[in-house]
Image (cartoon, grey):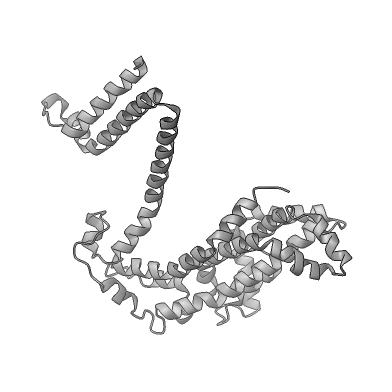
Amino acid sequence: MSIIGIVFLVLSIVLLGLGFYGASVDVVSAVGLAESIGQMKNFYFLLGGLILFIVLYRTAFAKASLRVQHAMSTTIRYIILIGVGVFMVYPLLWMISATFKDNNEIFSTLSLIPTRPTMEGYKAAMNNYGGDINIWQAMLNTYKYVIPKVIFTVISSTITAYGFGRFRFRGRNFLFAVLMATLFLPQVVLNVPQYMMYNKFDWINNPLYPALWVPSLFATETYFVYQLVQFMRTVPRDLHEAAALDGCNSFQTLYKVIVPMLMPALVSCALFQFMWSCNDFMGPLLYVQTPAKYPMSLFVKLSMDGDTGFAWNKILALSLISILPQLIVFFCAQDQFVEGISAGAVKG
């Protein structure tokens, strides 16, 4: 073992000792140090164990054969991936388990298994708030504008991207630069003029929610236009020329040739817009004023009673129910979503 390995080995033993014994020695002149060490026992224990594992692994790896080294490296990769996966999924699992706990247990433990399971959170989530609103009405209100917004965003963004990606016309580069410049325009600076304009159109508190989905008819989501333009560059122009020779006009070429090739990209855009629209809070807050028309994003906030305190199992149950459709849609379309994201990184 090298000198560096010995140093790290000694360091790991010291940290493990601090983790096991902490601040067990009560020295009057070092009370503060002892207390600080005692409060970080778990951290020292984990850090010491990690350093010790790395030292032993490198020592064993250096002495192993090539076949054993390959097996060891593969095992370590899977262990790291599983650990990162558990770390990322744990908050969602904890939220699900917390819906079956009361407030005291939620704030006293991080365990995934409730000690006193209760369904009070889900029962309270079904109550009405504001008289004419409940969780099912709020979900219906949400999808009244989310579904049209997703459909029209995909259609308008595809047509716009097709125009910029396949045709040459005067001012094309300038208009595309202006379009891209809108990515740097904060939405907050548009809220006041948009509200004044929509108010003149009588779109504020409209039961059809036109203020939330009508702008998507005009390719206002610049990010999706840019993404589809990049995907369109991967589609060979020979297909476009072959369709023209077969008698297809521009729109026939778009939906018969280009759109099937862009399907993974379109699914990616639809999923992003679906999740963003479902989670949007500022838009409904500005343009929806009647509690009976509130979507889920406002309904969850409405169900928080600041005077009597929050029943967090109810809030978490509402949140879980509200994201279930998003999770289902994502897992049903995850193959095309991943394909669309990875294909966008390749320029043909």
Is residue 22 in view from this perspective?
no
Q: Is residue 269 left or right of residue 83?
A: right
Q: Which residue lies furthest to the top in this view?
A: 3
**Quarter of the figure with the N terminus:** top left
Q: Which residue lies furthest to the bottom in this view?
A: 132
Q: Which residue is drawn at 82% across and 61% down?
A: 240
Residue 68, image quadrant: top left
In this view, the residue in front, 217 or 330, is 330
Decide which of 72, 308 is in the foreground and name it: 72
Judge by depth and name the residue closer to the eye, 132 or 74: 74
Task: Give the camera-side residue of 330 and 94.
Answer: 330
How many numbered circles does the render carry?
A: 0
Residue 96 appears in the picture as rendered: yes
Horizontal arrangement in the rendering, residue 221 relative to residue 299 (left or right): right
Q: Position of residue 228 (x, y in %)?
A: 69, 58
Where residue 224 sits in the image (x, y, percent)? Answer: 65, 59
Residue, x 85% and y 60% (percent of image)?
Answer: 241
Q: In this view, does 317 lie above or below 175?
A: below
Location of residue 264 by image quarter: bottom right
In the image, taking residue 283 as reference, residue 55 lies left or right, namely left
x and y percent of residue 249 in the render? 85, 69
Quadrant of the image occupied by residue 268: bottom right
